[in-house]
Every structure is written in structure tokens, then in C-alpha cells.
Image (cartoon, grey):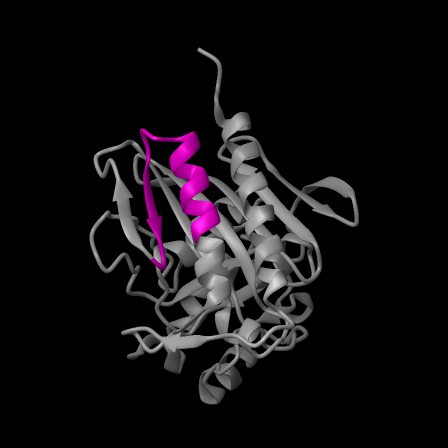
Amino acid sequence: MSDPAKAWLSVAETLALQAADAVLGFLDTPLATRTKADASPVTEADLASDRILREGLAKHFPQHAILSEENGLSGDVHSEYVWIIDPLDGTKAFAKGQVGFCVMVGLLKAGEPYLGVVVDPLESRTYRAVRGQGAGGTWQGRTRELRVSSRRDFSQMPLIVSTGFPSQALAQIQNFCRGPLLSPINSVGIKVGFLLRQEADIYVNHHSVSYWDTCAPQLILEEAGGLFTALDGSPLRYAMQAPFTHGVKTLASNGLRHGDLVEKLRGTALVSGF
């Protein structure tokens, strides 16, 4: 039986690009923004993107389940395949008209990331991967294979973090991660993109994240040779149980010093509380 992954990836990418176009259509217009129960914002752009992705995936994959940040779990919850979508990762940045947002579509197979697409609408970048088939990216009409950097000296490995990163913890991390510190930015997908382009090698996250934040970028990063784990180095788990959050802080890297990073991070303020 032929592998359907290539066709599935094409569908996911087409839908993600359509959703990204819809998001951009709201960028220069006044947005109706409301706050969800977890205090995170949601805008008309989130909802429009979510509708495109959910309806498109349900049409093409009626046997699969879909987990969306905005609408929860739907479809056959016992399916081997579950689509994990974040219609607008980095809503805070988007609502301010700032860089740091993207559209993400991932697919779990038997509870493990299997396929992923991340689209950065502002820079017209697309990242894609299928488990075991490598990672690719498209920018300015050119498509190429993606591989993380081979840097392994902490003094040469650029670090990227989110906005609002705790200053005490950041100072402690910079005691051993002495490479360049990139400007903080929103969106897990956007920050992983810096690793995929070899512009960063280490990404430390200071708060808990949900399945839709990690599924697609984790798969793409790992297919490019990197690693994406919990802060303590343990694998990220995707049990289909609400609230669909990993409940841990995370660490992504080019993989070459990942174990060393885990050990050094244990001595920082990040290991206690959220």
C-alpha cells in the first residue's frame, strides 16, 4: 500500500496557506478581540482561520479526529489520526500588528507527531515535514531541505526566548549560553523557525504549552535534526485528554548539546513553578 503522507501533507499545506491569507486580511482592520477562560486573547482572525482549517480537514479526512485550540476535539476520537491545529499562534503579537504569529497544522499518528506545516504569513515562509522524510521550507518562491546548524560551542549558539521571559532565569541561562541573544518574540512556530533557518540553536520556553503549540513545529524540527522536549529532557506526550496541555516548560535545540542544556537548566529559576 502506498504511503498517503505526501498527499496528506499537500492538503494540510494548502489549507494552512489559505488560512494564513485569511489572517493577513484582518491585519490592517480593526479586530474584535475577546478573552478566553485561560486569559488568552482570541480575534476574528483566529476564528476565520480555524473555520478554514477545521472544515477543510473534516472534508478531506472524515475518518480522522480534529483538535483545535478554538473548538476542542471533534470527529472520531478513537481514530489513529488526530489533526492538531493552531489557527493563529501568537495572537497577542498579531493583535498588536507585530511580527511573531503563524498558522500551524500538525497530525498525530497513534499519539506521536507524524506530519506538520507551519506558515509564517508576514514573511511568506512555509515549513513542512513528514516523519521519516526530512523537513523542507519555502521562502521567496524557493524550496529547500532544512537542517539545523552543527554548532555545539555554547559561546557560538544563538539563544531565542519568548517575550516576557523572567529576567532572573534569563541571566542564569546566559551564564552558560554565552552566544548571541536574539530579540524575544511570540509564537512557538516562529521561534522554531529560527532554529530551522540556523539563525538560533537554543529555544527555552518559560511557561506551559498546549498540544497545538508544539505538534507541528516539534515534528518539523526533529526531521531537520533537532530536538524538542520538556525542560527536563523527557518526551512531550499527547494523551487525548482535556485540557490538552503538556503542563511543562519546554526546550528545543539543534540537538548537539541538548543533554548538557537539560543538566545546566536544572540549576536555574525555571525549574520551580510557573
Residue 217 in percent (x, y) is at 51, 51
Q: Is residue 31 visible?
A: yes
Q: How many marks?
A: 0
- Residue farthest top in this picture: 1
Residue closest to the eye, 101 or 34: 34
Q: Would residue 41 be counted in the magenta stretch?
A: no
Where is residue 200, by image quadrant?
bottom right
Q: Is residue 48 above or below residue 219?
A: below
Q: Is residue 114 visible?
A: no
Residue closest to the eye, 268 or 118: 118
Residue 109 in percent (x, y) is at 35, 34
Q: Is residue 93 left or right of residue 211?
A: right
Where is residue 156, by image quadrant?
bottom right
Rendered residue at 50%/43% (across/down): 116
Residue 247 in percent (x, y) is at 28, 64
Rendered residue at 24%/35% (across/down): 76
- Residue farthest bottom in this picture: 168
Where is residue 207, by image quadrant?
bottom left
Residue 214 in percent (x, y) is at 43, 55
| Residues rendered magenta in the picture | 51-70
Residue closest to the eye, 216 or 197: 216
Q: Would residue 56 be counted in the magenta stretch?
A: yes
Q: Is residue 151 left or right of residue 19?
A: right
Rendered residue at 55%/51% (across/down): 19
Rendered residue at 56%/77% (across/down): 30
